[in-house]
């Protein structure tokens, strides 16, 4: 028996030893990544990288490295659209835009030159396949004039068009190759799979391997007409935020997109840098205007009480350094934003008075939100719990109704939820993108808010305004919208990118949070 | 039935019932043996831990130093003199939340186990007593439930019903009854063949009377043991569901949800560590007690309950 | 662990005997009893697999979610034309029964549908992630078999000693800990603080996976002769498989202890001891061999339980396996993924049970005769 025990111990220690050895073996590996590869990490929300179908953060991050667009934003400044593949001219009435292909020898990854045909085809395919981003060019007629020129004509004035075209969903593809692979400009298009595995862009990178579950690998496009990127290979991995943090700290990854403010604080200078920029997202509370569904929330006094009961400073604290107050749903950097010093303030006395006027007696109001969603590091579940505690101080009782995003979206879109947290990410940086929140717009329909003559008049005025007057007219419109308290703006979160210390120089701006091609 | 059974694959209506004294069916023995089981060291420790937890749960409002929902401390502060176990991401006191969470977890787990023991035993008894088609249908459904990993099935059911404690309980109930059905069925089949039951049947007793009066006493003590062991796994499954945010709806404090919050705040280890420790100790207590109880059963029945059930 | 409890209860002889009963009643043509037994087991397994498809289909149809909402962006969802087109493409405009038969038909052709979240065929994704879980499962099984058997044997041989009590207590504690918590704590201590194991994932991110043969990185890297990759993959495997093994070690210890105790009481062992054979010979030649058969089946069943234990473990370790895939599918209510994973795991369970039943059929004639 004794001998048996000894054997047993011996076996155990052998096991432990092997484990230790293996651990040492891997532990001693050089941390920091192999020379010309960047490992970037994000929690994937990836359905496709076919530019004309892609509509999520992950897809657009990848596509902006693969595809060039007709227009771009000057140094990432979202208020200044500028030349991309083309130069542009807008007619006086904002109805016709002329794009002229620039003579810069742009080439697709197979060496073909970019032509006006490719540009016209890309626009028409975006429109025709009826995908998520098709609405970008709704009501726009595309016409190829000659080998250098394409015109875009709209029935109504379309001053937002220059702000729309830089979107990576409107990436220019190699029309010849895409057509050869079942690409069309109508619903019969069958090139999605092909484009996922064989990108057809003229940007700095091309796809090497696409796996929507785990990782996407990009390699340099040797025909790219810009400066050769230092990092020839980009590995974008699907990992959760907490793993991203440890990977940046240990040098296993160089770029992390999803850290929240608490996690970002744990990265000190020896490990890397944090680039914080205003995001283009808005977080808000929606209130259903239909009394049958909204209950108390349909009462303007109740809504205003909610607005006065929220402790906005604490929300900023939760969202982290760099997040901002909002006076409307339009992000502070956009044309048409309401100055943030006009944002609502906490006033519990006022809130209680308004509640009395509304005749609210503490009944529970269902409050819906996506339990699995974080917006730029702001966890919606935590936000909801915070709001619940704050409103309680004013005597408002929220009944939290968490659900996975797809269930939550379904309920919200069918206009059945009295109250809840909404999020909106700008599709393009122009106030017209926020018209959906005005009665008659798609999102206003979801809270059964169908009519408001005053807002309609302001909206008409804003649509006609030009130049600097446009900014003021839209600001007036959205200020008046906030005053109804149907939408209660909460916070504009901050977009945080953590960059590992092995990268010495990088470009990060509001348009592209990390530019792989320009990293050194 | 369990892995334990393969060793007794015959599963015949064995001599066991015959061996058993019909005048002194299980119920009485169980009454005597419960305290005896608690006198073994493991049982004693288990009962001690459980008693502490019961006191904590009952007196949580008095014991908790702060309001479990109030967000009025600095966020993410490490354990200190004021907040003995630190604070969470929203600035709530972790100790208070842990204590209050015991008040939902413990009764919910006991409740779900009682329900599934009742449901499973009744179905198992019906299957075992009537046999044939009824038996086939009930036991095939039980097999089907066994074919899915508990957590995945519970996950889908909870997702289908929507998050919430009530739905989590339903989900666990639906996935946990089959083990009782199996044990009860085989015990009933054994008892059915025994002389006193046959005698009763000859006297013209109804099936209901025979099940309730003559067979039930043989079945109760194994089922009680299985149920004690099962409270632990019910707590674990429930914690797993709330870890996946399919359990209690916030802001109700919940151990599983607290761990999941802690996972994303690695540096603030106290958020996840202490609730996990609570789950560990309480599940351990039930396993200790259940294990000691099982040892008091006769070996054959103990095998039915399953050497490896936890 | 809770998520695994039912696993070991998986197969049972009660049902086997139930079928045997049924078979007796219908008085089948005279077949070799063993062959008949196998045929019945195959039939039962097929019926169960069919049942699994019904259950997965029904459950996912109870889920109050619209896949269209998951697929479409905010703007596209406001366009009724796009919504109608998407519904039609997904076949959601058909009645439920038609949808089920379409699903079953596709299934028979090996088509498990396409993920709502990633638009990737579910079968292809499962093919990708399955080897990862198998690798983790094998690692955990190896650890738990070696430690579990040894501890169980030790515990049985020294019955009622201090060692026995200590081992029994520890094994009870082992099955009492929530896996996801142990995983988090282990990751925090051994990686985050001590750095003795590599981080999350199956390989360090900049290492290219070895050319795919089996999908198991350790095996593939050996086949390709890439020793550095092998060491890295093994390093990544250690912590998650230890965590996952914790529960099965507890199970196996308890089970092997009781099996060995049963054998020890048997006459031939007593006889061997009486003959004065050395303790080691008695232990390995008689006791261990006798206890081995039931133990093997527990190992088989434990493997199934590992698949479910992996759901939460893989999530913590960013292990890109079936568990994490199921977790992502469930949290985003990606129905085709949930159905696919449920089906695959259900089939694996049923197959394992089938094999276990067969082993018993061969080993213990009483099972098939009755």
Image (cartoon, coloured by chain):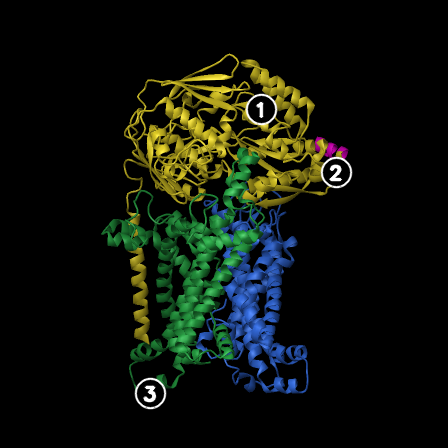
Give neighbour class at mark 1: few <14, some 14-19, many 20+ (Cα, 10 Å). some
Instruction: Report the span colored magenta.
Output: A350-357
Determine if residue C158 is in view: no
Q: Compare residues B296 and B129 and report the one nearer the observer.
A: B129
Residue A413: % across, % down: 60, 38
Q: How much space separates mark 1 and mark 2, taking CA atoms?
A: 30 Å
Q: Which mark identifies residue C274? A: 3
Q: Main secondary structure of the magenta part?
A: helix
For image coordinates 62% across by 84% down, the residue present is: B197
Query: What color was chain C assigned in the picture?
Result: green
Q: Which mark identifies residue A340? A: 1
Q: Compare residues A64 and C93 and report the one nearer the observer.
A: C93
Q: State the yellow chain.
A: A
Confirm whether circles 1 and 3 share one chain: no
Question: Chain letter of disc 3?
Answer: C
Query: What color was chain B assigned in the picture?
Result: blue
| Residue C257 vertical placement versus C132 (above, below) | below
Q: Is residue B34 left or right of residue C142?
A: right
Whether the residues at callouts 2 and 3 have beta carbons within 8 Å, the answer is: no
Give neighbour class at mark 2: few <14, some 14-19, many 20+ (Cα, 10 Å). some
Task: Answer with mark 1 or mark 2, whichever residue precedes in sequence.
Answer: 1
At numbered mark 3, what does the secondary structure look like: helix, strand or loop? helix
Q: Compare residues C187 and A75 and report the one nearer the observer.
A: A75
Residue that numbered label 2 is attached to: A360
Q: Is residue B221 left or right of residue C1?
A: right
Q: Is residue B191 left or right of residue B309?
A: right
Confirm whether circles 1 and 2 share one chain: yes
At numbered mark 1, what does the secondary structure look like: helix, strand or loop? helix
Q: Nearer the viewer, mark 1 or mark 3?
A: 1
């Amino acid at each position: 028996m004794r001998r048996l025990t000894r054997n047993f111990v011996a076996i155990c220690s052998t096991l432990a030893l092997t484990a230790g050895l293996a651990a040492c073996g891997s532990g001693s590996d050089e941390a920091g990544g192999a020379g010309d590869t960047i490992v970037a990490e994000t929690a994937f929300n990836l359905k496709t990288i076919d530019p004309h179908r892609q509509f999520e953060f992950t897809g657009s991050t990848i596509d902006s490295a693969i595809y060039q667009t007709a227009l771009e934003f000057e140094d990432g400044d979202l208020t200044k659209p500028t030349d991309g593949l083309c130069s542009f001219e807008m007619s006086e009435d904002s109805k016709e835009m002329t794009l002229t292909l620039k003579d810069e020898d742009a080439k697709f990854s197979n060496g073909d030159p970019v032509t006006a045909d490719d540009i016209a085809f890309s626009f028409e395919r975006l429109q025709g396949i009826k995908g998520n981003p098709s609405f970008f060019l709704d009501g726009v007629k595309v016409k190829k004039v000659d080998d250098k020129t394409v015109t875009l004509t709209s029935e109504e004035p379309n001053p937002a068009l220059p702000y729309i075209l830089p979107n990576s969903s409107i990436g220019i593809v190699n029309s010849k190759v895409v057509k050869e692979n079942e690409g069309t400009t109508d619903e019969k298009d069958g090139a999605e799979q092909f484009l996922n595995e064989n990108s057809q862009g003229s940007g700095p990178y091309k796809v090497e391997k696409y796996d929507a579950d785990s990782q996407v690998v990009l390699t340099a496009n040797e025909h790219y007409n810009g400066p050769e990127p230092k990092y020839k290979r980009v590995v974008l991995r699907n990992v959760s935020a907490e793993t991203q943090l440890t990977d940046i700290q240990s040098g296993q990854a160089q770029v992390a997109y999803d850290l929240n403010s608490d996690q970002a604080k744990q990265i000190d200078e020896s490990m890397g840098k944090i680039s914080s920029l205003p995001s283009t997202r808005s977080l808000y509370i929606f209130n259903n205007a239909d009394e049958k569904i909204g209950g108390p929330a349909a009462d303007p006094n109740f809504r205003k009480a909610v607005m006065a009961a929220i402790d906005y400073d604490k929300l900023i604290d939760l969202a982290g350094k760099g997040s901002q107050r909002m006076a409307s749903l339009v992000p502070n950097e956009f044309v048409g934003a309401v100055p943030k010093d006009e944002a609502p303030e906490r006033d519990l006395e006022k809130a209680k008075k308004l509640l009395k006027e509304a005749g609210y007696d503490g009944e529970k109001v269902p409050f819906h939100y996506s339990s699995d969603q974080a917006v730029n590091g702001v966890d919606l579940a935590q936000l909801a719990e915070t709001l619940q505690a704050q409103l309680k101080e004013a005597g408002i009782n929220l009944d939290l109704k968490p659900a996975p995003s797809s269930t939550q979206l379904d309920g919200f879109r069918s206009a059945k939820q009295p109250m809840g947290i909404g999020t909106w990410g700008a599709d393009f940086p122009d106030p017209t993108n926020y018209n959906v929140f005005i009665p008659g717009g798609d999102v206003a329909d979801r809270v059964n808010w169908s009519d408001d003559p005053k807002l309609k008049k302001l909206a008409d005025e804003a649509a006609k305004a030009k130049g600097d007057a446009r900014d003021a007219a839209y600001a007036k419109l959205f200020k008046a919208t906030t005053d109804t308290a149907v939408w209660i703006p909460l916070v504009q979160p901050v977009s945080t990118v953590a960059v590992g210390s092995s990268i010495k120089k990088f470009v990060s701006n509001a348009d592209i949070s990390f530019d792989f091609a320009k990293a050194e | 039935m369990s892995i334990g059974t393969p060793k007794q694959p015959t599963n015949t209506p064995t001599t066991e019932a015959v061996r058993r004294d019909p005048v002194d069916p299980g119920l009485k023995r169980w009454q005597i043996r419960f305290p005896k089981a608690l006198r073994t060291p493991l049982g004693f420790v288990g009962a001690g831990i459980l008693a502490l937890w019961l006191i904590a749960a009952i007196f949580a409002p008095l014991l908790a130093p702060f309001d479990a929902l109030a967000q009025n401390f600095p966020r993410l502060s490490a354990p200190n003199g004021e907040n003995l176990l630190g604070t969470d991401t929203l600035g709530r006191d972790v100790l208070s939340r842990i204590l209050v969470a015991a008040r939902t977890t413990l009764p919910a787990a006991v409740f779900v186990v009682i329900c599934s023991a009742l449901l499973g035993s009744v179905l198992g008894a019906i299957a075992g007593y009537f046999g044939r088609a009824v038996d086939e249908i009930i036991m095939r459904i039980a097999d089907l439930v066994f074919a899915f990993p508990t957590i995945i099935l519970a996950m889908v059911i909870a997702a289908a019903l929507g998050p919430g404690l009530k739905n989590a309980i339903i989900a666990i109930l639906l996935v946990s009854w089959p083990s009782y059905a199996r044990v009860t069925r085989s015990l009933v089949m054994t008892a059915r063949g025994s002389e006193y039951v046959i005698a009763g049947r000859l006297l013209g007793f109804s099936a209901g009377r025979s099940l309730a009066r003559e067979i039930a006493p043989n079945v109760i003590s194994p089922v009680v043991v299985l149920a004690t062991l099962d409270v632990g796994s019910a707590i674990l499954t429930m914690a797993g569901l709330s870890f996946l945010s399919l359990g209690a709806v916030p802001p109700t404090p919940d151990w599983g949800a607290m761990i999941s919050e802690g996972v994303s705040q690695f540096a603030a280890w106290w958020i996840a560590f202490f609730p996990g420790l609570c789950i560990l100790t309480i599940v351990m207590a039930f396993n200790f007690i259940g294990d000691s109880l099982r040892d008091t059963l006769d070996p054959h029945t103990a095998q039915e309950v399953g050497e490896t059930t936890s | 662990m809770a998520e695994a409890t039912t696993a070991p209860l998986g197969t049972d002889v009660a049902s086997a005997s139930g079928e045997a009963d049924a078979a007796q009643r219908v008085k089948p043509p005279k077949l070799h009893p063993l062959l008949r037994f196998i045929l019945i087991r195959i039939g039962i397994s097929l019926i169960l697999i069919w049942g699994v498809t019904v259950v997965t289909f029904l459950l996912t149809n109870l889920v109050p979610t619209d896949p269209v909402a998951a697929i479409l962006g905010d703007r596209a969802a406001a366009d009724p034309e796009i919504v109608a087109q998407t519904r039609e493409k997904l076949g959601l405009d058909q009645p439920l029964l038609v949808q089920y038969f379409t699903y079953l038909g596709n299934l028979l052709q090996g088509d498990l549908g396409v993920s709502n979240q990633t638009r990737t065929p579910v079968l292809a994704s499962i093919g990708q992630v399955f080897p990862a879980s198998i690798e983790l499962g094998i690692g955990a099984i190896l650890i738990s078999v070696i430690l579990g058997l040894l501890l169980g044997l030790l515990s049985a041989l020294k019955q009622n000693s201090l060692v026995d009590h200590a081992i029994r207590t520890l094994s009870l504690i082992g099955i009492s800990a929530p896996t996801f918590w142990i995983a988090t704590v282990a990751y925090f201590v051994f990686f985050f603080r001590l750095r003795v194991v590599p981080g999350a994932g199956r390989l360090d991110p900049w290492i290219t996976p070895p050319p795919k043969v089996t999908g198991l990185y350790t095996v593939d890297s050996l086949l390709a002769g890439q020793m550095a990759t092998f060491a890295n993959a093994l390093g990544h495997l250690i912590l998650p498989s230890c965590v996952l093994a914790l529960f099965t070690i507890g199970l196996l210890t308890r089970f092997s202890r009781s099996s060995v105790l049963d054998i020890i009481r048997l006459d031939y062992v007593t006889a061997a001891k009486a003959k004065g054979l050395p303790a080691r010979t008695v232990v390995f030649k008689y006791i261990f061999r006798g206890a081995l058969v039931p133990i093997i089946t527990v190992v088989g069943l434990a493997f199934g339980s590992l698949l479910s234990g992996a759901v939460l473990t893989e999530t913590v370790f960013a292990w890109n396996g079936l568990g994490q895939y199921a977790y992502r599918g469930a949290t985003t209510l990606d129905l085709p993924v949930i159905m696919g994973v449920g089906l695959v795991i259900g089939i694996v369970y049923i197959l394992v049970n089938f094999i276990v039943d067969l082993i018993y059929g061969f080993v213990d004639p009483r099972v098939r005769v009755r």
